[in-house]
Image: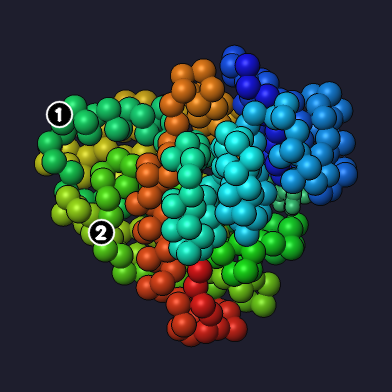
Amino acid sequence: MKKVCIVGYGAIGPIHGLALEKVEQARLYGVCDIDPERRRLCREKYGVKEYEDFDAMLQDPAVDSVHICTPHWLHYEMIRRALEAGKDVVTEKPVTRTRQEWNSLKALEGSDRVCVVLQNRLNPCILKLRELILEGSLGRAVAVRAVLTWSRDRAYYESGDWRGRWATEGGGLLINQAIHTLDFISYLLGDIRKVRTDMCNHTLEGVIEVEDTLSAHLELESGVKGVFFATNGYSENSAPFLEISFEKGVARYMDQKLWVNGCLAAEDAPAVAGKDYWGRGHERLLQRYYDQQTCFTLSDAENTMETMFAMYEDAVSGKPFRGGSGPFTAP
Ligand SMILES: NC(=O)c1ccc[n+]([C@@H]2O[C@H](COP(=O)([O-])OP(=O)(O)OC[C@H]3O[C@@H](n4cnc5c(N)ncnc54)[C@H](O)[C@@H]3O)[C@@H](O)[C@H]2O)c1
């Protein structure tokens, strides 16, 4: 039975707590957060040990596994230190904030054991779609389009001083929200090899430094061509839309349902808690990791991370940036 410490008990940390309740081979043992109120919430709910200081927590031999649920700029250093202390590591996306950190992480001893939270890969519709693609009954994929229209307003960005800043979040819409939709594409259809991307800040000028909207053309190793539009400047959080055209038909993931050639093929279950669009993936991902010893590794996340960095480099690195006070240096 692994003893887990959640590091960062803000928005997503509690979802890890709830998901761990459904895991057999692990239990929540501790919470590490610099905010005493957040630690108190977790201790009162689960009766766990509190740690104010990350390094002090790492020195506790009772902790087997740490879940990194902190702001992006802390991920690399926390993962590095946790590996050095011999802990198992589960990290929230994005694995790192910059390409440089990503490359350094991959070179660290033990980093091949890091479990990456890309929980939406385990949505029933995505699992079904992947199964259909692997079995080949729809023929070769020829085109993909993805659309994400979500709402992140001033209040959201002001809820944490790390949000909306290059130095601490590493980007905006793409690195934090649309990364899951981008990930669907490479997870289902194979590596993306080329991107042309435009980014801008349409709705939060003066509030965030980073992008709230992007549009991109993608080219995959397989020859599949794709288009991708995403924004945080919509008025609600619509379910992601993904359409893949095959030689023998079309699959559409919309309204959390999968339609194949017009027939319902799968349906996602409602969220276990928290935001509906976080789904039940955390539960499945942690069950897979602790009970079945399988996870999404850094190499499973590689193409999504590389594509994300390439999109920032293409769209904003050193260029004027509409809606911001650019030019910015992308991560
Ligand atoms: N997989 C998903 O669908 C999903 C959803 C939401 C967030 N996330 C990811 O989870 C991570 C956290 O996001 P969030 O929205 O929960 O952020 P948040 O700001 O709500 O919570 C972060 C927590 O980390 C704590 N913290 C900050 N510095 C710390 C330190 N040095 N030591 C210990 N604790 C510290 C803060 O006090 C806060 O409680 C991000 O990587 C984000 O992208 C993933």
Q: Is mark 2 within 8 Å of ligand 1?
A: no
Within-10-Å neighbours for mark 1: few <14, some 14–19, many 20+? few
Where residue 125 sits: x, y (%)?
38, 31
Q: Which residue in the structure is indicated by mark 2?
A: 193
The N terminus - image quarter? top right
Please determine whether, in this image, residue 242 is positioned above or below residue 71: above
**Point 61% across, 35% down: residue:** 87
Where residue 88 sits: x, y (%)?
57, 34
Q: Look at the numbered discs 2 and 1 and tell me whether their residues touch, using CB distance below 8 Å.
A: no
Where residue 255 sits: x, y (%)?
44, 38
Residue type at mark 1?
Ser
- Kindly tell me whether residue 120 is visible in this rendering: no
Within-10-Å neighbours for mark 2: few <14, some 14–19, many 20+? some
Q: Secondary structure at mark 2?
A: strand
Front: mark 2 or 1: 2
Quarter of the rendering containing residue 307 = bottom left
- Kindly tell me whether residue 19 is visible in this rendering: yes
Q: Nearer the viewer, residue 225 or 162?
A: 162
Q: Is residue 121 left or right of residue 12?
A: left
Q: Nearer the viewer, residue 89 or 198?
A: 89
**Point 80% across, 46% down: residue:** 53
Marks 2 and 1, how far apart at CA: 25 Å
Q: Secondary structure at mark 1?
A: loop
Please determine whether, in this image, residue 288 is positioned above or below residue 329: above
Q: Is residue 215 left or right of residue 150?
A: left
Quarter of the rendering containing residue 252 = top left
Q: Which residue in the structure is indicated by mark 1?
A: 137
Q: Is residue 160 left or right of residue 192?
A: right
Where residue 303 sits: x, y (%)?
35, 51
**Point 30% across, 40% down: residue:** 188
Residue type at mark 2?
Arg
**Point 56% across, 64% down: residue:** 170
